[in-house]
Image (spheres, helix red, strand yellow):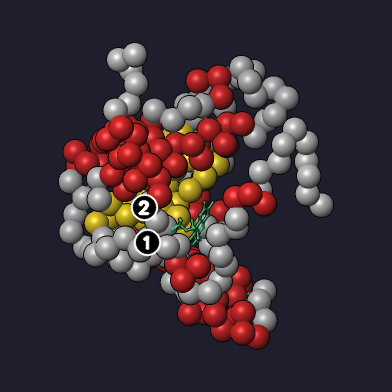
């Protein structure tokens, strides 16, 4: 079968999956070459999508003024979020670095145009969120391709949607799916930062896999 992966190709794919990290604090300022950005955007554009809808757009942000505006909103949202935790947990939350908006040379907003393929979309009729999920598939493709290119990506969701839409001029019908920070990094951590900093551990896979029917609470 000549469309099979060689062992080395398979290993490379798993390497990208297992060494991908959410990057917040390790961005370097070097610019991301256009051809590299084009390759990872093409990888995102090859994600699966419901009814082959391809509902995504990619807003590439490099203007420091726009980044600053988004960062100011992050600061406000982060204070609101911190207030929801108490005691030690709040202190730990306050020590977490949860974005790299200004340090990352490129920010990228991936959006969903829910009307891209008209009112009736193959596969979306009974489960209307499928177009949103398709855009998340594009995010993951981009995240893995970026890792293979040696670029870090960090997802920032501590933002107010209305402020984000206004800052980027996003029309009413378009849904922002992901706001990402992107750039070269000093290094990739081997473990999620939320784990090393004591926020939460990876769950054992065997607790999450059920056979034939739901076996949990
Ligand atoms: C939908 C969504 C939203 C967010 C995230 C992820 C995803 C999928 N993550 C990253 C998240 O914290 C991270 O993926 C996990 O901690 C696991 O770490 P690794 O991605 O494996 O390094 C994230 N990280 C962060 O620092 N600030 C944020 O606002 C968010 N938001």
Residue at 45% over, 62% down: 192
Q: Label 2 belongs to which residue? A: 19
Residue 109 locus on image (x, y percent): 42, 47
Q: Please indicate whether residue 208 sits to the left or right of residue 42 in the image.
A: right
Q: Label 1 belongs to which residue? A: 190
Disc 2 residue lies near ligand 1 with CB under 8 A:
no
Residue 133 locus on image (x, y percent): 57, 36
| The one of 137 and 109 positioned closer to us in this rendering | 137
Residue 216 visible, this angle: yes
Crowdedness of circle 2 by 10 Å Cα count: few (<14), some, many (20+)? Answer: some
Residue 163 locus on image (x, y percent): 52, 57
Which label belongs to residue 49? none
- Residues at discs 1 and 2 in contact (Cβ within 8 Å): yes
Q: Quadrant of residue 215?
A: top right
Q: Please indicate whether residue 47 sits to the left or right of residue 35 in the image.
A: right
Crowdedness of circle 1 by 10 Å Cα count: few (<14), some, many (20+)? Answer: few
Q: Which quadrant of the figure contains the N terminus?
A: top left
Residue at 50% over, 20% down: 52
Residue 57 locus on image (x, y percent): 42, 36
| The one of 208 and 105 positioned closer to us in this rendering | 208
């Amino acid at each position: 079968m000549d469309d099979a992966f060689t062992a080395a190709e398979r290993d490379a794919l798993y390497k990208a999956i297992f060494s991908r990290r959410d990057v917040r604090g390790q961005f370097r300022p070097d610019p991301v070459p256009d051809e590299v950005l084009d390759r990872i955007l093409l990888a995102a554009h090859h994600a699966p999508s419901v009814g082959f809808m391809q509902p995504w757009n990619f807003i590439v942000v490099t203007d420091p003024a726009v980044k600053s505006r988004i960062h100011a909103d992050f600061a406000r949202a982060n204070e609101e979020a911190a207030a929801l935790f108490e005691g030690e947990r709040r202190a730990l939350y306050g020590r977490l670095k949860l974005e790299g908006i200004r340090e990352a040379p490129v920010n990228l907003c991936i959006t969903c145009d829910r009307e891209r393929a008209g009112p009736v979309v193959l596969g979306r009729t009974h489960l209307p969120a499928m177009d949103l999920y398709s855009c998340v598939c594009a995010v993951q493709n981009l995240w893995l391709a970026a890792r293979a290119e040696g670029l870090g990506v960090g997802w920032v969701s501590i933002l107010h949607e209305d402020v984000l839409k206004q800052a980027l001029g996003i029309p009413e019908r378009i849904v922002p799916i992901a706001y990402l920070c992107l750039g070269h990094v000093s290094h990739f951590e081997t473990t999620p930062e939320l784990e090393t900093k004591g926020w939460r551990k990876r769950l054992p896979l065997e607790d999450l896999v059920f056979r034939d029917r739901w076996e949990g609470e």
